[in-house]
Image (spheres, rainbow, N blue to C red):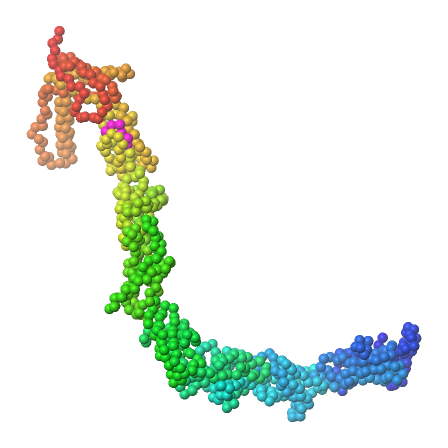
Amino acid sequence: MRVRRGAGPPGPVLMSTALVLLLLSVVGPARGSEDIVVGCGGFVKSDVEINYSLIEIKLYTKHGTLKYQTDCAPNNGYFMIPLYDKGDFILKIEPPLGWSFEPTNVELYVDGVSDICTKGGDINFVFTGFSVNGKVLSRGQPLGPAGVQVSLRNTGTEAKIQSTVTQPGGKFAFFKVLPGDYEIVATHPTWVLKEASTTVRVTNSNANAASPLTVAGYNVSGSVRSDGEPMKGVKFLLFSSFVTKEDVLGCHTSPVPGFQLQDESLVYLCYAISKEDGSFSFSSLPSGGYTVIPFYRGERITFDVAPSRLDFTVEHDSLKIEPVFHVMGFSVTGRVLNGPEGEGVPEAVVTLNNQIKVKTKADGSFRLENITTGTYTIHAQKEHLYFETVTIKIAPNTPQLADIIATGFSVCGHISIIRFPDTVKQMSKYKVVLSSQDKDKSLVTVETDSHGSFCFKAKPGTYKVQVVVPEAETRAGLTLKPQTFPLVVKDGPVMDVAFVQFLASVSGKVSCLDTCGDLLVTLQSLSRQGEKRSLQLSGKVNSMAFTFDSVLPGKYKVSITHDDWCWKNKSLEVEVLEEDVSAIEFRQTGYMLRCSLSHAITLEFYQDGNGPENVGIYNLSKGVNRFCLSKPGVYKVTPRSCHRFEQAFYTYDTSSPSILTLTAIRHHVLGTITTDKMMDVTVTIKSSIDSEPALVLGPLKSVQELRREQQLAEIESRRQERENGKDEGGDGRTKPPAQEMVDELQGPFSYDFSYWARSGERITVTPSSKELLFYPPSMEATVSGGRCRLREPVAHLHSCPFARV
């Protein structure tokens, strides 16, 4: 239950309080003798309009325990807190943050007799003002410095109402500020402020400055000494990649004569000069990262200052650069060149007295720092370049050293052996000779390492490099290309000397009459026994290429294997010297026909449908014969001889090659009968083979009769040709022969006959005639089945007339 006092006359208020106390005492629980019921109340007062509902009043014990809390009346700020116990208490006002009241708390001793609450007095809290907040920032940064003095003034006056200093981060606040218009002004004894003032309007709550105040920069200082004494006139050049030249104040922005910037990523801003006391300063630098480089130059020489470069960061305060700079010895510069008037050698190591080492830059220049007067030994080193050691006296009046010039360069290369001949043992190292082509004609020999690499040291000039290959390896086919490597050493090392084993490719093609199918090409060495390589070719085309790679020099035989085909050249000999071998061709000329014959014969073959050019005749001997058919396909093969075979003709297919076997089963037997007169002549032939019946031939015609019949036929043929010529419109000027005569029949007359006999068959030949007798009357012959002999009859019989009885 909360009891609030109104603002009316005292009578009603006292009555309300007494009524409340009476009710509390009547309805409250029974308590001890020290228990009381007292109300502590009062007002939150303000001369300006505030929101009382945002304020709380809290009662704490003296130990800090919250006893009771209540809100204020929103219309007049009245509050009331009941107390049931005697003792020490603290009454606090807790307004929104930034609101100020007096007092902020009240200590109470409630005894139930004389305390303000028991007497019914008011405890009042008076509002004294709002807070004003703001920031002082470093230029371009989200935070600012501590220690900047900030004053609050009424607008249009110089009188300060309040003053404060910024906290870390740049924040500041004024309290107990009543509503009104104000000006905020910031000052600092050393820092330059870019935005030094702003305004604020306070109404019925806390207020923020219209805009932040800004510090343009902070003073940065340092010092330089030499042997403990301050140094005057040393320039300190300032660089930054984040701050622009326009943001920097209090230093010289012109370039420094004689200074050369080594780091192109740095952006030059300005420089400061050390004073008599050795100090230097940059009066206003914005927050950010910087680099300072000292530069001290005498009349003819630049002295070294350590450190030679210092990076630092300005945050939100003045900065004293540490460590102190010290002027050391002087610096000298030089160059390392690849020849007189040559180019600079980058990344060369220059050693001073075998102690100080520096590397040359991209242009070959180098800088030796902290040098004192004296005599020094200078030596330059760079892989594959050679320099003489130089002894020189260095003093401040000799800031530029004489050029260090390369006197020699490496000539390096490699021997690559891919396939070593099998017939000799491989060497692990080879000798390589570098011979000068200039006047001195000098020779230098080195040995390769186990990997075939080698290097020479050579002065500028013209040279020739050659590898010494043992004669046994040369004979075995090891050849290196080139045989000699010419080169010119001018102003740099020569690193591309290369000797590569020459391995040829042997290539060619196979031309087939039809689809090639499967073929085997073989490459066999003629000088190295057992070295043989084969390529299996396969394809449904009439031409196929082949290549043998990595072929050692030497003589070879290249062969093609297909026993059922005929080739223009079945094998070729080639020699690999220093070039690849190509244009080898194996051309198929036909298809191999193999015949196994029991007797020597004439074989006639014909291919249907491909014209008369595919007719061929071969005279073959007894045994196995081979000959070529010019085109693929099926052939009809017919034997022609004095022997008769199992078939009158045979067929042969080139796509299915096989041995054609012809075995004679009968043999042609010839006989002749000679008579003085032309008579009727017959011949009876009886065989020793029971299954063979007797054969009667005749009446026979004599050879003369047959010849006469042929002549008559020829005469008749010519006559008919003449008659046909007239009918077709000939001029008839061709005169017929005066007389065409035929031979008269004159004895003796010969009658030829023949018989097909089997091998080993014995025959009996008996001639007969109506008017002639024959001698011998019959003949016997045994057929051996040997070779045919023309005009050599088995039987030769003569006739004589006989008398009729």
Is residue 697 in view?
Answer: no
Relative to 584, say whether 92 is above or below: below
Quadrant of residue 596 within the rendered picture: top left
468, above or below 740, in the image = below
Q: In this view, does 299 lie to the left or right of 627?
A: right
Q: In which quarter of the image is the C terminus?
A: top left
> What span is in magenta?
595-600
Quarter of the figure with the N terminus: bottom right
- On the question of residue 658 being in view, the answer is yes
Report if residue 748 lies within the magenta region.
no
Residue at 37% x, 58% y: name it: 450
Residue 73 vs 551, above or below: the answer is below
Residue lying at the far top in this picture: please name it. Answer: 805
Going 29% across and 25% down the picture, which residue do you hit?
646
Left or right side of 581 for 257? right
Q: In this view, does 132 lie to the left or right of 442?
A: right
Residue 132 locus on image (x, y percent)? 68, 84
Residue 593 coordinates in the image, percent (x, y)? 29, 35
Identify which residue, 225 or 261, lies in the foreground: 225
Q: Nearer the viewer, residue 241 or 437?
A: 437
Task: Give residue 618's position: percent from left, percent from top.
Answer: 23, 33
